[in-house]
Image (cartoon, rainbow, N blue to C red):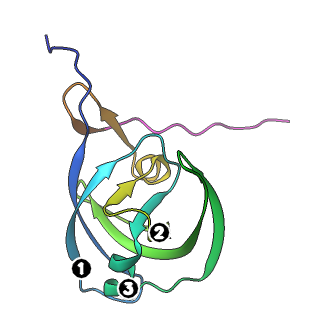
Amino acid sequence: MGSGKVRKVFVTVEVTNVNSNSFTKVRALIDTGADNTVIPKRLAEDLGVKVRDETFISTGNGPTKVGVGDIKIFLNGQFAYNTVWISDKVNKVLIGVVLLEQLGLKVNPVKGTLEKEQQVLYAVSR
């Protein structure tokens, strides 16, 4: 059995803007405390990601203003379109739980890996 120690989970992802097929590999931290994926402003500029909106989000340092844009991403062998927050306050890509759920992935914090998770559809009946 493992030591039970919780590990940070880092992955290599490939990202680009929604109109390009030229992907850039970056190292990303899986952040299960974040709803949305966040990318550094510099990376967004390098990729040509268009800021289509701005919003305020809550952080550990209080409210902060971020841009909102769209990317294409390859993560764990899977492809997705994803709405991201664009911030000049982060220096790495942070993968949030919305993208993990979209791809049917969960974190195994003891092994420090991503694993497939059974997705669930809840039906509402009258």
Secondary structure mostly taken by the magenta-highlighted segment of the chain = loop
Q: Position of residue 125 (x, y in %)?
A: 79, 35
Q: Position of residue 3 (x, y in %)?
A: 16, 14
Q: Amino acid at mark 1?
A: Phe
Q: CA distance from mark 2 to mark 3?
A: 11 Å
Magenta region, residue range: 116-126
Give the camera-side residue of 11 and 8.
Answer: 8
* Residue 45's disc number: 3
Q: Amino acid at mark 3?
A: Glu
The image quadrant where one finds the N terminus is: top left
Q: Residue at x 46, y 52 (%)?
A: 102
First in sequence: mark 1 or mark 3? Answer: 1
Residue placed furthest toward the top: 1
* Left or right for 7, reference 30: left
Residue beneath disc 1: 23
Q: Residue at x 22, y 77 (%)?
A: 24
Q: CA distance from mark 2 to mark 1?
A: 20 Å
Secondary structure of the residue carrying numbered label 2 = strand
Q: Nearer the viewer, mark 2 or mark 1?
A: 2
Give the camera-side residue of 124 and 66.
Answer: 66
Q: Position of residue 42 (x, y in %)?
A: 35, 79
First in sequence: mark 2 or mark 1? Answer: 1
Q: Is 114 located above or below residue 53 in the figure?
A: above
* Residue 87's disc number: 2
